[in-house]
């Protein structure tokens, strides 16, 4: 009897506790690619945080005697490891400071999109009716038209400032989160434990907070990690076009755009910021693919059974946008 | 099938209508063009005359009515900068963008299908892993960087290809590669994902047991099931290529609709911005409908359902 009841009870219980840190790190040791990517991201994060305190001045400090130094010129100091630009500013310091802006804008965009997207998506899915129809049509419009086009039209009107860029990017990413949150809510809403809670007299607020949110959140968070890379690329494109981050601030896209004028004389000005974008985007992709496999109970079970399954098993499934 | 397509058509039309209304609102929000085009010391009469000439003295609903009429006539007035009808400017630039996209998409597919299949066939071999990481990298490289690095290597260092402009086939290589890279990477991931699932399915095992060869197994049996996701994502990517052309055209000085739009934004030439946005939006609208029709033709569940 108890054997029969167990799976039933499990079916209606909230999902099992997700893997703790120890399990995650243990799983990471089996997947070398993900390990390398995670180490890269950790080092980048460390570099950006340290750089935020130590390299701000260095990035704008001009040294005309050290103009256009090629990468590897460390005789005059470690700051010219990646060379210097036409005003003798350290490329390394500028990449670190620019990275702060790029990564900061991306994280802010994704964080706002997650919060607003989950709220609107759950509301649309749980309430339904005209509310649902309005939110979904609005989401359709911005989903049907590619990000850059909408962003360019929006930035045509609003003055380019960091906050505008974030708003534009949120506009661009929001529909994805709304759709996923709504779809999950629609599905969860009909499950037995939600009906039970309703019968017991729980308020709509309590049901969404205690029963729906814990199921919607992990899915959204998995998408959010992947989306970080997408947002970073869009931000870089906008900055590159001169419609994102404005000088004298720097961002990776802006550094690439600035360096383009000196392509013949100093290739490193465009190469390294672009490389930073590529490496970071690839690392985020790898880690988030890996995270998805590990956090998914079905795939995690396979992971324990057959070791090689640790690779990103269903790459691309979430990239349909 | 007709019902399905009509429903999708109505759906897309609503979306298009909302988008066009947004363009109207945004352009009106972007400030008084009189401030931009008239000298600072211009009199109020001059400003009023200017507003009257472009119809900004009318109440907003009259302006909106005129916007809708303009849309139907495909006429948005003259470009301030080029002294040509804005629509002519936008439409004469558009074919060059279309040709770029029409070349970039097949290139992306030609790369994505073998790459994705290779990554799926032996996922854990060295070749399979390399293909997976290759697809991931291609999907993560910003198009502007590929473009610039291409110029650096092939134009500046080797001198094989021109840096920008239009002309013979040499002028097409770098823009097409820059546009194709990201779609190729994303599509390869889609092909891989679908193929991994398909190759594990019973009918493939049956075919394998029957002794079907490797290439026939992949391309005759398995790939058919991968077609639908590839079309869906390919359609989205094509829409992305049309707008991604904004970046690539700027780098290569390619006189397509993307560059026209960026130039008009920088020059505040709002009739051209409006006309280009409408042209791109309508082309994406048409593209979505074509994909729906294709989808209905390929998937019997939609065709017969």
Image (tube, coloured by chain):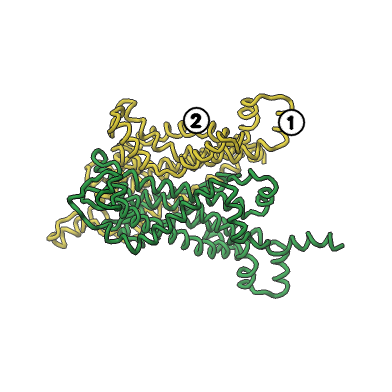
Chain colours: A green, B yellow
Q: What is the residue that sits farthest to the front in this orientation? A: A75
Residue B305, percent from left and from top: 67, 41
Does B285 appear above or below B160? below
Q: Earlier in the sequence, mark 1 or mark 2?
A: 2
Seen in the picture, residue B102 relative to B283 is either above or below; the reply is above
Extreme residue toward the left, this view: B41
Dot 2: element: helix
Q: Position of residue A205 (x, y in %)?
A: 60, 72
Q: Which residue is mark 1?
A: B206
The answer to which of B268 and B76 lies nearer the viewer is B268
Decide if residue A111 is in sight here. Answer: yes
* Mark number displayed over residue B110: 2
Give coordinates of residue B272: x percent, y percent: 30, 46
Any part of residue B166 in sight: no
Return the chain for callout 2.
B
Callout 1: SS: helix
- Say left or right for B43 vs A169: left
Residue contact between numbered discs 1 and 2, judged by CB atoms under 8 Å? no
Task: Point out the residue furthest to the right here.
Answer: A1
* Residues behind callouts 1 and 2 on a single chain: yes
Could you give the CA–CA distance between mark 1 and mark 2, rounded to whole angstroms?
28 Å
């Amino acid at each position: 009897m108890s054997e029969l009841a167990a799976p039933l009870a499990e079916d209606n219980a909230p999902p099992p506790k997700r893997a703790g840190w120890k399990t995650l790190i243990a799983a990471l040791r089996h997947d070398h690619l993900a390990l390398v990517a995670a180490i890269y991201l950790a080092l980048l994060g460390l570099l950006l945080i340290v750089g935020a305190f130590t390299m701000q001045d260095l990035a704008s400090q001009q040294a005309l005697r050290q103009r256009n130094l090629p990468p590897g010129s460390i005789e005059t100091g470690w700051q010219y490891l990646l060379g210097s630009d036409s005003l003798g500013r350290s490329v390394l310091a500028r990449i670190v400071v620019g990275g702060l802006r790029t990564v900061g804008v991306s994280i802010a965009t994704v964080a706002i999109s997650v919060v607003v997207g989950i709220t609107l998506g759950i509301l649309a899915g749980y309430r339904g009716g005209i509310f649902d129809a309005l939110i979904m049509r609005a989401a359709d419009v911005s989903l049907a038209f590619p990000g850059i086009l909408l962003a360019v039209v929006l930035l045509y009107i609003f003055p380019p400032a960091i906050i505008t860029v974030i708003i534009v990017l949120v506009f661009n990413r929001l529909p994805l989160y709304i759709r996923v949150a709504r779809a999950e809510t629609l599905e969860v809403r009909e499950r037995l434990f939600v009906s039970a809670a309703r019968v017991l007299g729980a308020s709509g607020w309590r049901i969404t907070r205690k029963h729906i949110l814990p199921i919607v959140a992990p899915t959204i968070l998995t998408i959010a990690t992947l989306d970080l890379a997408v947002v970073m690329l869009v931000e870089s494109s906008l900055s590159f076009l001169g419609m994102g981050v404005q000088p004298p601030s720097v961002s990776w896209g802006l550094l690439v755009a600035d360096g383009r004028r000196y392509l013949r004389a100093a290739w490193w000005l465009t190469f390294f910021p672009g490389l930073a974008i590529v490496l970071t985007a690839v690392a985020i992709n790898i880690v988030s693919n890996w995270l998805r496999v590990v956090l998914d109970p079905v795939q995690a079970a396979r992971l324990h059974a057959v070791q090689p399954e640790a690779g990103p098993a269903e790459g691309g499934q979430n990239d349909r946008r | 099938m007709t019902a399905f397509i009509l429903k999708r058509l109505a759906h897309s039309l609503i979306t298009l209508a909302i988008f066009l209304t947004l363009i109207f609102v945004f352009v009106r929000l972007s400030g008084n063009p009189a401030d931009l085009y008239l000298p600072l010391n211009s009199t109020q009469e001059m400003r009023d005359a200017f507003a009257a000439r472009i119809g900004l003295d009318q109440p907003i609903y009259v302006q909106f009515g005129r916007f809708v009429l303009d849309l139907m006539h495909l006429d948005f007035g003259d470009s301030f900068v080029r002294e040509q009808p804005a629509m002519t400017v936008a439409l004469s630039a558009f074919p060059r963008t279309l040709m770029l996209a029409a070349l970039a998409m097949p290139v992306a597919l030609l790369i994505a299908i073998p790459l994705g299949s290779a990554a799926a066939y032996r996922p854990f071999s060295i070749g399979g892993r390399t293909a997976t990481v290759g697809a991931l990298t291609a999907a993560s490289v910003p198009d502007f960087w590929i473009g610039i690095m291409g110029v650096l290597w092939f134009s500046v260092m080797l001198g094989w290809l021109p840096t920008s402009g239009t002309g013979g086939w040499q002028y097409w290589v770098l823009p097409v590669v820059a546009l194709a890279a990201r779609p190729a990477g994303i599509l390869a991931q889609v092909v891989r994902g679908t193929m991994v699932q398909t190759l594990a399915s019973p009918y493939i095992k049956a075919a394998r047991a029957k002794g079907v060869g490797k290439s026939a197994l992949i391309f005759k049996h398995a790939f058919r099931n991968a077609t639908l996701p590839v079309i869906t994502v390919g359609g989205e990517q094509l829409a992305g290529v049309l707008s991604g052309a904004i970046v690539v055209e700027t780098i290569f000085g390619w006189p397509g609709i993307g560059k026209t739009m960026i130039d008009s934004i920088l020059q505040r030439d709002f009739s051209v911005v409006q006309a280009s946005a409408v042209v791109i939006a309508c082309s994406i609208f048409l593209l979505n409908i074509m994909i729906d029709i294709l989808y209905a033709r390929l998937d019997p569940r939609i065709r017969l359902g």
